[in-house]
């Protein structure tokens, strides 16, 4: 009987071996990837640091790399890819194969602040990465030049309405976390403020010390030497709870600024789509690394508080931070440019 006149059952019988063979081929092709994920890491792993060597992010990335190398017995190599406020390094990871061979150690800015201030980023902060481990955090501290005659945040707000033109506050630049912290403060209190952007933290602090501005929000670790030296006064920290590194400094919330919470943080991520087996192995290993006394001591040396937790918690935190800083940028009238 000609092939086109066979019964449906006959045609199915002829096609069945082809279908089975195709399924077997697909399964065989998938096996190497599954095996690699289960054996991970079976080769050197690079950790992209999106900043130059020597900074806080780079130092923490190297601590993480050393801890993972000791646990897995494979090289974990930090590769610095700075530029464009961290965007270059993040895009390297976003474009890398999702096989566990490339990881990202990032600070908060390029993931939750920069997307709201910079147009046409080459990566999607919420979709391009698999959050692995939220490692550490630090609040910012409201630092005031000593000549400003106030004792607390309420008095600072009141003075802003009494001083002609309002009070001035310095930041690391337009759209920086220090700028947005100031705008969140303005929105929450109605303070009358003038923003003075500088090209980086160092120049902003120098301007404050010189008396060119009245106050600024600075990362606590960077601000502590100036506070302890009496060159500035610490008015409040931006975390929900007092920092163990400045226990005498009250929070913004404790001084009547309801719901005010902000800070910087550091975390380990991978390209989106990284196999679940790799995520699980790395999650377990990082729990061990972060529990080590030497790692905790290194965090304390940088005035950082260890966080930890599973990848799902980091993902939820990342989404909430993205929304919070986006709202702050919009309230400040910042248009991505």
Image (cartoon, rainbow, N blue to C red):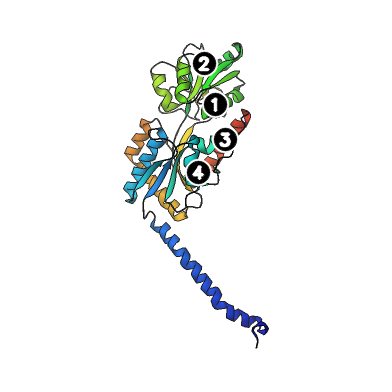
Q: Secondary structure at mark 4?
A: helix
Q: Is residue 10 above or below residue 313?
A: below
| Image spot of residue 236 (x, y percent) | 49, 22
Give the numbered dot on residue 179: 1
Could you give the CA–CA distance between mark 2 and mark 3, rounded to whole angstroms? 28 Å
| Image x and y of residue 286, in percent | 39, 45
Which numbered tag is attached to residue 118?
A: 3
Q: Which residue is mark 4?
A: 91
Give the distance between the C-alpha atoms of the residues marked 2 and 1, in whole angstroms: 14 Å
Image mark for residue 56 = none
The tag on residue 214 is 2
Q: Residue furthest bottom?
A: 1
Q: Are marks 2 and 1 in contact (CB under 8 Å)?
A: no
C-alpha gap between disc 4 and disc 2: 38 Å
Comparing labels 1 and 3, the label whose residue is closer to the camera: 3
Q: Earlier in the sequence, mark 4 or mark 1?
A: 4
Q: Residue visible at 49% across and 31% down?
A: 263
Q: Is residue 205 left or right of residue 77?
A: right
**In the rendered structure, are the residues bearing label 4 and label 1 in contact, judged by CB atoms less than 8 Å apart?**
no
Find numbered disc 2 in the image and state the secondary structure of the residue it sits on: loop
Residue 57 in view (yes/no): yes
Q: Position of residue 63 (x, y in %)?
A: 36, 40
Identify the mark nearer the N-term, 2 or 1.
Answer: 1
Quarter-wise, where is residue 188 in the image?
top right
Q: Point out the frontmost of discs 2 and 3.
A: 3
Mark 1, Cα crowd under 10 Å, few <14 / some 14-19 / many 20+, is: many
Seen at 42% across and 51% down, the residue is: 101
Instruction: Name the foreground residue: 210 vs 224.
Output: 210
Q: Are marks 4 and 3 in contact (CB under 8 Å)?
A: no
Looking at the picture, tell me which residue is in the foreground, 130 or 189. 130
């Amino acid at each position: 009987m000609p092939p086109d006149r066979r019964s449906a059952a006959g045609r199915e019988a002829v096609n069945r071996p082809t279908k089975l063979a195709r399924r077997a081929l697909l399964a065989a092709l998938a096996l190497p990837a599954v095996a690699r994920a289960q054996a991970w890491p079976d080769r050197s792993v690079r950790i992209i640091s999106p900043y130059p060597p020597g900074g806080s992010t780079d130092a923490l990335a190297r601590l993480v790399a050393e801890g993972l190398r000791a646990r897995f017995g494979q090289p974990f190599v930090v590769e610095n890819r700075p530029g464009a406020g961290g965007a270059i390094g993040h895009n390297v990871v976003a474009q890398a194969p999702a096989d566990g061979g490339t990881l990202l150690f990032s600070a908060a800015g390029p993931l939750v602040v920069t997307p709201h201030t910079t147009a046409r980023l080459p990566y999607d902060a919420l979709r391009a990465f698999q959050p692995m481990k939220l490692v550490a955090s630090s609040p910012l501290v409201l630092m005031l030049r000593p000549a400003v005659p106030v004792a607390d945040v309420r008095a600072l707000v009141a003075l802003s309405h009494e001083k002609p033109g309002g009070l001035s506050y310095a930041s690391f630049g337009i759209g920086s976390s220090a700028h947005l912290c100031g705008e969140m403060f303005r929105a929450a209190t109605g303070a009358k403020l003038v923003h003075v952007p500088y090209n980086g933290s160092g120049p902003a602090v120098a301007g404050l010390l010189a008396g060119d501005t009245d106050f600024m929000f600075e990362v606590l670790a960077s601000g502590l030497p100036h506070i302890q030296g009496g060159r500035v006064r610490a008015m409040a920290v931006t975390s929900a709870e007092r920092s163990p590194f400045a226990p005498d400094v009250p929070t913004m919330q404790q001084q009547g600024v309801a719901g005010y919470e902000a800070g910087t943080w550091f975390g380990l991520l991978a390209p989106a789509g990284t196999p679940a087996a790799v995520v699980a192995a790395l999650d377990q290993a990082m729990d061990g690394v972060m529990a080590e006394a030497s790692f905790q001591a290194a965090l304390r040396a940088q005035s950082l508080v260890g966080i930890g937790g599973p990848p799902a918690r980091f993902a939820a935190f990342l989404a909430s931070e993205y929304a919070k800083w986006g709202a702050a940028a919009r309230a400040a009238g910042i248009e991505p440019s």
